[in-house]
Image (cartoon, grey):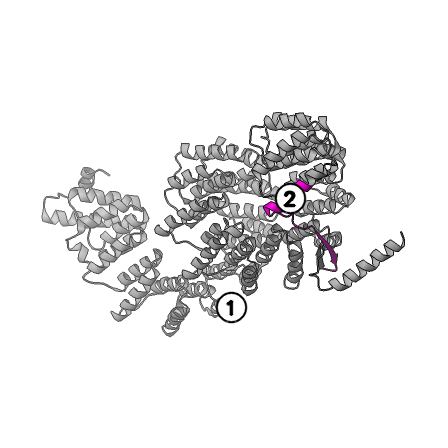
Amino acid sequence: MEIAVTLSILGLSPTTKQGHFKVSKDWNSTIKHQIKLKNDHAILSTYTQMESLGIAPDSATMPLVIKACERLNAIEKGVRIHSRIRGTDLIRHVRVGTALVDFYSKCGFVGEASKVFDEMPERDGVSWNALISGYVRCSCYSEAILLFMEMQKAGFTPSSRTIVALLLACAEMLKLKLGREIHAYCLRNGLFDMDAHVGTALIGFYMRFDAAVSHHVFSLMVVRNVVSWNAIITGYLDIGDYTKALKLFISMLLEGIKFDAVTMLVVIQACAESGSLQLGKQLHQLAIKFNLVDDLFIINSLLKMYSDNGSLESSCLLFNAVPTFDAALWNSMISAYIAFGLYAEAIAMFIKMRSEGSKEDDRTVVIMLSLCEGLSDGLKQGRCLHAHALKIGMELEVILGNALLSMYVEHHQIDAAQKVFDQMRDLDVISWNTLILAFAQSKFRAKAFELFQMMCESETKFNSYTLISLLASCKDGNDLRFGQSIHGLAIKYGLEINTSLNTSLTEMYINCGDEGSATNLFSRCPHRDLISWNSLISSYLKNDNAGKALLLFNHMISELEPNSVTVINILTSCTQLAHLPLGQCLHAYTTRREEFLELDASLANAFITMYARCGKIQYAEKIFNTLQARNIVSWNAMIAGYCLHGRGHDSILVFSQMLDDCFKPNNVSFVSVLSACSHSGLTETGLQLFDSMVRDFGITPELAHYGCMVDLLGRRGHLAEAVGFINSMPIEPDASIWRALLSSCQVKSNKKLVEIIFGKLVELEPTNPGNYVLLSNIYAAAGLWSEVAEIRKWLRDKGLGKPPGTSWIVIGSQVHYFTATDVSHPQSEKIYENLNSLTSLIKDMG
């Protein structure tokens, strides 16, 4: 409405005092009318016209204008209004001051709200309530509670709004005693019985401490509405009691309470978490019946529920039936495909999203980055996504920045990760921990610790996972002091030694050779979980102590049931100890539990490897042939298994079948098949496969591949070709390459060449006695006994000795170890007695 037209319609002249009063009154009436229409934009437009005419709203209208600014988040406009009325009579009015307090606190400027409150010449209960609620909204819980105490001293009575805010503050600060006092106040003053919001707030408060008390409060509520029901159902969902949440929803229906969209969202999530697919389908039908399927939040929740419960087909059908999409729905569908390992479909969905004009958000990019780890060209795809995000103007906020950090770290691109870290607008504890862990795992401990020191100087406080990241750099006895200093740091700063940190410290002490401290920490941990047990078992195995890993497993099963990770770890010990009976027992154990072998390819692969290495290749074949969902690890396990049994032709046959089934071989595949060619004398086939690896599959050979080729040529007596091959390598050969060549010299001795190769080995590993023993064996096979004697003298002079070989036998669940002339076994006298008796019998029999 133009100003001139408005004045004409009103028939007023603003030049007279009476006219000015009437115009002001009518402008105020216009704003009040627009309030009824809930048209905040019109309110601010009207106020702007009043400003241009020099007409100020009255004390009743000005709060309405300020509230419109708050609802529209028109911060600059609100601040200008505050500045304009500062020093006028309007600012002295309690309603105007309260409106400003509410405006600033709801816009996140609680400091400004507090200043306005302090400057108010007159306050009422609403003013106090507004600032208390503002403090709580801005997470200033201590300030809210202190202000409440001042309010009581000033003689003002808190409203139900104040009580709700205070209970939220008590819950966040875990102030149970104060919350109970507020509860008692509500009971004394009738607030609990009269206001459902108070009861609902008490449900949420007590749910932080004791679900039973929270439920009791709910049952005592005289006035209950849908919000109260939602609060108690959500409470049980949050603490992981999904069955109780669903039962309450059924009770809600039986009592005839009409549920809303919030209720539906919560119970669908409970179905997703509890695996209740059939109930989820019934909820879908209810959503259709009560016209909730137009709500994209509901659709999104149903889609995720179907996906989480293994029904991807239902997710797809639901997605395709939706007429309009938002970014969240696209994101959920892409996530579903990724969860099922269908990366190609996820990428196609992302492309379709863009082609149909839906604008991706940072969450979309984060989801797409998560699949890069499972792609052969994951780094390339991750870089493309990074470039795309920058191109469309996405800021490196915390969520996107952390996803990029993780992607680069997973692909060992530490420099790129550092660059992302430096460019991020904000950093949280996850950002710091991710980069610290990357440095620690890449053996850049100094950089990891330097970054940790920078973190300590920043506003971000380190947590237990920061220390876990630093502990990742502790690999052996040389790192013990550093690990101990991290342990001391946790104690010094009063950091809780939670289960995760305790597990990492235990693992560090085992890796660094301090088994006593490790077992002490482990035994004192009050809440040992499966991860703790699995970690210690794995640590023993990594340090070649399969016997202790087995003992720990026997102890573990008396306390809790193992999972597939435990079984895989113990299968490793079965492999190391050639303990076939235990491996078979574990196979029977997992067969009895349907959730294992069929659904867990990793476990099936571990059984294939165990049977192959324990001499039962036919059992490995049977598992492999019945495996429904093979992956590249399954194929590699069979190729390696046949190689161990000297069946090189079968290894090559399985490799060919893998290619026919459209599986792309990886580095490990070629190490296994080249090793099979080497052990079976298939020289030409091995050379062809090596060329194909580079030419057809674009795999850059690593030292392991070069070692296989040297062994392949050397075993066939092609020593000159093997030397030429080593000299043509684009990377520096390590000791394993020269050792493979030296081993081949046993077949066709060439003393001069042997001496050259041995010289290379001594340069690289001067203190490895195994190299001297290998040379000694070559000379002994050639009958060069003087050289053998000389090598033994070298060993004595250098103080080197080959570690004694160890034998073992498993009786029951106990592993018994022996070395030459060993007398450490508690029954060694009886053992030697029987050994001597057997020796005598053999001699007597000639």
Question: Where does label 2 land, which residue?
Answer: 793
- Which x, y percent locates residue 697? 61, 28
Residue drawn at x 72%, y 45% is 613
Tell me if 24 is positioned left or right of 603 in this view. Answer: left
Say whether residue 40 is visible.
yes
- Front in this rendered view, residue 513 or 312: 513
Residue drawn at x 41%, y 32% is 391
- Front in this rendered view, residue 655 or 645: 645
Question: Where does label 1 land, which residue?
Answer: 212
Give the residue furthest to the bottom.
Answer: 188
> At label 1, which amino acid type do we have?
Ala
Say whether residue 250 is visible.
no
Residue drawn at x 41%, y 41% is 421
Look at the image and give the residue range highlighted in magenta.
789-813
- Label 1 neighbourhood size at 10 Å, few (<14), some (14-19), many (20+)? few
Give the residue furthest to the front.
Answer: 786
Of the 4 image quadrants, the one containing the N terminus is top left
Tell me if 588 is positioned left or right of 152 in this view. Answer: right
- Which x, y percent locates residue 808? 72, 54
Looking at the rendered image, the disc whose residue lies closer to the viewer, 1 or 2, is 2
Q: Earlier in the sequence, mark 1 or mark 2?
A: 1
Say what secondary structure mark 1 lies in. Answer: helix
Tell me if 233 is positioned left or right of 663 in this view. Answer: left
- Label 2 neighbourhood size at 10 Å, few (<14), some (14-19), many (20+)? few
The reply to whether the magenta stretch includes residue 809 is: yes
The reply to whether the magenta stretch includes residue 656 is: no
The quadrant in which residue 179 appears is bottom left
